[in-house]
Amino acid sequence: MELILKSDNKESIAKIIALAKELNFIIEEKDTEITSINREALKEKILNFRTTSESSFGDPVQWQIDQREDRELDISAILENQKKLLELEGEIKLDDKAFQ
């Protein structure tokens, strides 16, 4: 088996090489630099990526529609929470009749 590691961080590579030597791996070093042309090509490849299969999560548009569908709102719970919020802010002390 062959493993190729590429990094610009010399410290990390030195640590990996030291560990590999302790584990009796054969190490071949090649000085290659990542040029800006390679970076640009990689960037373009990533930006233009298109999949050929459907997402494993399903259709995102349908998911959004399902999440935003109309539901019955529990108005009494909403009003109760609003009452508690106003009382906590100290603006007003309300009785239950005001929210019925």
Image (cartoon, rainbow, N blue to C red):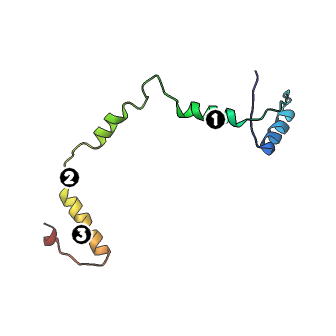
Q: Which residue is mark 1?
A: 40
Name the residue at 27% across, 69% down: 84
Mark 2 neighbour class, 10 Å CA radius: few under 14, some 14 to 19, many 20 or more: few
Q: Left or right of 55: which side holds 63?
A: left
Closer to the chain start, of discs 1 and 3, is: 1
Residue 10: horizontal and vertical position, in percent? 80, 43
Q: Which residue is mark 2?
A: 73
Residue type of the residue flagged with mark 2: Leu
Q: Which mark is residue 83?
A: 3
Q: Position of residue 79 (x, y in %)?
A: 21, 63
Q: Amino acid at mark 3?
A: Lys
Q: Secondary structure at mark 1?
A: helix
The image quarter containing residue 63 is top left
Residue at 75 percent of width and 32 percent of height: 5
Q: Quadrant of the C terminus?
A: bottom left
Picture coordinates of residue 38, whole percent (x, y): 68, 32
Q: Amino acid at mark 1?
A: Glu
Report crowding for label 1: few under 14, some 14 to 19, many 20 or more residues within 10 A (C-alpha): few
Which one is closest to the eye, mark 1 or mark 3?
Answer: 1
Q: Is residue 17 left or right of residue 79?
A: right
